[in-house]
Image (cartoon, rainbow, N blue to C red):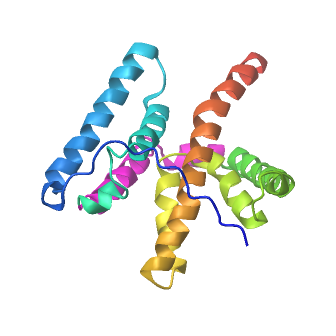
């Protein structure tokens, strides 16, 4: 059979030696990218979350950031904890009366949204050459966005994966798709739709 061409590497930044891949140095490199994203966001007005995604991929591809840098720096669990705190702090001002008053509308919108996502995902699964299950999983990212789209693949891998290799394979397969889908649907599409719908309110 024909040989499958190897993926062309874009890495030109030399990797640090093992002695220099300490948690402090790894986090310092990651912090530099974060500061760069914030500066570009201030200059251009582009959402820093989009810049985090794009520049994170770019700096990983050129070799400046190591793969699984959070795990290598020993800060993955701490980052997950902080992200969960961010999610729940948004609910700090919600009261039981407020939740009950919005409950009928929320249930209606949720049911219509779930049905719509399933239908559209089944249609687009063939277009993007995904399995129906993967397409539905990607489609549901519009309900929660980041950071939940980052957190869920790890939870799924932990629950389903039988060993470390299988867990890594699940994360590598689902995480990029979920992150991109979450950013596109929540950060971009939701803003466009809100601009269109607000005229009817």
User: Viewed as shown, does residue 32 lie left or right of 97?
Assistant: left
For the C terminus, the image quarter is: top right
- All told, the count of numbered labels is 0
The image position of residue 11, as x and y in percent, is 40, 45
For the N terminus, the image quarter is: bottom right
**What range of the chain is rendered magenta?**
74-102
Q: Residue most toward the front? A: 2
User: Viewed as shown, does residue 34 lie left or right of 184?
Assistant: left
- In the image, what residue occupies the spot 47% across and 40% down? 53
- In the image, what residue occupies the spot 55% across and 43% down? 98
Q: Any magenta on residue 126?
A: no
The residue lying toward the viewer, choosing from 4 and 71, is 4
In the rendered view, would you say 148 is above or below 40?
below
The quarter of the displayed image where residue 51 is located: top left
- In the image, what residue occupies the spot 46% across and 17% down? 45
- In the image, what residue occupies the spot 17% across and 48% down? 25
Q: Any magenta on residue 94?
A: yes
The quarter of the displayed image where residue 12 is located: top left
The image position of residue 190, as x and y in percent, is 65, 32
User: Viewed as shown, does residue 161 lie left or right of 201?
Assistant: left
The image position of residue 6, as x and y in percent, is 56, 58
In the rendered view, would you say 122 is above or below 191?
below
The residue lying toward the viewer, choosing from 174 and 59, is 59
């Amino acid at each position: 059979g024909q040989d499958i061409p190897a993926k062309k590497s874009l890495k030109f930044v030399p990797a640090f030696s093992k002695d220099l891949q300490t948690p402090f140095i790894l986090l310092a490199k990651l912090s530099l990218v974060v500061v760069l994203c914030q500066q570009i966001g201030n200059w251009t007005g582009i959402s820093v979350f989009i810049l985090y995604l794009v520049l994170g991929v770019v700096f990983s591809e050129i070799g400046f950031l190591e793969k699984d840098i959070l795990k290598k720096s020993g800060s993955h669990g701490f980052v997950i904890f902080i992200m969960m705190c961010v999610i729940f702090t948004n609910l700090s001002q919600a009261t039981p009366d407020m939740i009950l008053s919005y409950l009928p509308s929320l249930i209606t919108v949720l049911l219509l949204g779930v049905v719509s996502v399933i239908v559209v995902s089944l249609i687009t699964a063939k277009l993007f050459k995904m399995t129906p299950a993967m397409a539905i999983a990607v489609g549901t990212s519009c309900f929660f966005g980041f950071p939940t789209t980052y957190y869920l693949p790890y939870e799924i891998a932990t629950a389903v994966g039988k060993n470390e290799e299988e867990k890594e394979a699940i994360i590598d397969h689902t995480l990029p798709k979920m992150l991109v889908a979450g950013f596109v649907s929540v950060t971009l599409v939701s803003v466009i739709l809100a601009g269109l719908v607000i005229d009817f309110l």
